[in-house]
Image (cartoon, grey):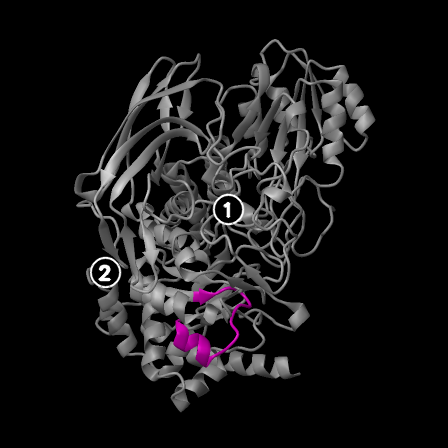
Amino acid sequence: MKFRASLASALLLATAAAGPVVAQHGARQRSGPAHPWMNAALSPDARAAMVVREMTRDEKLTLVFGWFGTDFPAKQFKAPAGALPGSAGYVPPIPRLGIPAQWQTDAGVGVATQGGAPKKRERTSLPSGIATAASWDPDNAYRGGAMIGDEARRSGFNVMLAGGVNLLREPRNGRNFEYAGEDPLLAGTMVGAQIRGIQSNHIISTIKHYAINDQETDRNAGNSVIDPAAARVSDLLAFQFGIERSDPGSVMCSYNKVNGTYACENRFLMNDVLRRDWKWPGYVMSDWGATHSTVGAANAGLEQESGNPFDDQPYFGAPLRAAVQSGAVPETRLTEMASRILRSMFAHGLFDHPVAEQRIDMAAHADVTRADAEAGAVLLRNENALLPIASGTRHIAVIGGHADKGVLAGGGSSLVYPVGGNGVPGLMPKEWPGPVMYHPSAPLDAIRRLAPGATVRFADGSDPAAAARLAADSDVVVLFATQWAGESFDPALRLDANQDALIDAVAAANPRTAVVLETGGPVLMPWANRVGAILEAWYPGTSGGEAIANLLFGRVNPSGHLPATFPASLDQLPHPETPHNGDVRYTEGATIGYKWFDAQGARPLFPFGHGLSYTRFGYDGLTAQAANGTVVARFRVSNVGPVAGQAVPQIYVAPVAGSAWEAPKRLGGWKKLPLAPGASAYGEVTVDPRLLATWNEARREWRIAGGTYRVMLAASATDIQQTVTVRVPARTLPVGWRPTAAN
């Protein structure tokens, strides 16, 4: 009863503050002399200031409190009438001032649905975030973001809860598939590009989950313990790069504590870093259930409590009204909260470009996601050129992974319900974080279309002996192996069920076996040296089956590279023990992924940056200069193989001596270069000076030690092709420094 009473009072408060809900979703608000802030020629800051001067306290309180957009019977909650069914969130409009509602959709790979999947909410899914990151192609990430942002807009949403940039510290993290790998530069660049694409549709995107939110075990109460200086050059740097490249309208604070304080009431994260140091002008919204206080959260920098009734009480409802009345939260702070929200709404077009539900070009969008899946798939192994499958192959065995039905998707709030429904309904768990979803893009059908003269036979893999007999009677085997991951749990670092034994049996019967992995991140592969080829397809999205077949038959040349290190064993990890509750002490600091392996002298199964092709590339001509203290590397890449392909030359940097880095080297940049057979291209990478620096927490500044630095041209973190040295002058960069054309 206590819950219902507080919920009812909050609902009355919001209804009274907002006035009647607009009847027609997406209706353009009236403008005129009474609404001078509708002048689009004014700056977002000026427009927000004009509106907020006219707002009552109740109207400001309306803006800072968000509702879940879906009925929640378990908490006896019915969504507000203005919300879109099955949606993540809703903030009511304020018609008196022409302020539109905020219709919020869960996201990451597309318009996600909560509380069931009405048929009209079937949408297009991109591949998983880690798959897009594996393309190492910001333009590809932008195109995918623009596509899902278009679907959000055409579905009636103007806020998309996308943009996951949490680093892959823990390879068993159940949400790694939503994110962009282990390196802050790669993750921030790729996610920033996707956010820019989303926001090109005149909607707001978030960047999330802020911060150090690197496992799902005990996610609501766990405490991430990390040295602040180490955080600045790792997890926080990924957010900084992402924000600089995209200007997201909102940052979503995470569930966990950071150094003993919940992220959504963490003054260091929200006020000190975001506002004071980075000068970011947007608003912080909480994750659904991540608000734990009223006065503490509001004064520490939280602007919007999201997803009532997920929190223990509506902290920014009646309790915030009382806190403002008492002065515990100053009226000026409430005004700032409303101003920041309004500023983002103006900056990203929510006032000037009202959303309205419209037809979606599903076919065109399926092509976008197919191209993304093709660009992000990583060819990990290809002994004796087993792939691509030769055109004259007569007998092909396809085994396992429900390849006759579809391709796997990750679970939880980012799940997109596909056109055509679940390809493999009924798998457990059926409820949260399920359902286990297979997009109905069957690789088996696509393989048969590309091999019309071959006999293509399928075995589901449930009987390893039967699968082995089929393999022995085939010219080549394509074995699909899966690992389901999702929000709220951390899976083991292995394939599901008995698939390792299945692969062993099939490879023993026919070593001409190509394993296609559909996983949320790295997995152990005790069988890796016994199979002919390994293609990491990740969760490949709406058109994944077609993309995989195109790659297997060489219609598309694989060009993805790993955004995360694949360990050879658990004992290679900084924390081999299973993720646990309570304090998670990141004693490795910023030494994440390939940096940890470098520092330990450990050899991974497959290194960060690794990716094979059906052609071969040569690397030479590396030079480096340090004009004005900024290192610029130039190099040449040549296609010395038989077919067109795309190289991903990588630049790593390291001090020769005299600088206390966390690891022997850092990624400094890369280029993705398409090359015809026999062709060469020159690439240039400008290294962000902060990647040469250490962070001084006491003085809040970047410090570059003067001296000699190595600049390395590489095909992966362990495959260094050429090294030169360059002298870099000592340099100090202020906390708010960011690149400009003059740098």
Magenta residues? 285-303
- In primary-sequence order, the first of circles 2 and 1 is 2
The residue located at (32%, 35%) in the rendering is 710
Q: Which residue is nearer to you in this view: 708 or 214? A: 708
Quadrant of the image containing the C terminus: top left
Residue 465: x and y in percent read 82, 26
Give the percent coordinates (x, y) of residue 481: 67, 34
User: Which quadrant holds the N terminus?
Assistant: bottom right
Q: Secondary structure at mark 2?
A: loop
Residue, far front: 658
Q: State the mark number for residue 40.
A: 2
Mark 2 is on which residue type? Answer: Ala
Viewer-side residue, 699 vs 430: 699
Residue 288 belongs to the span the image colors magenta: yes
In the structure shown, which secondary structural element does the residue marked by tag 1 occupy?
loop
Q: Which residue is mark 1?
A: 109
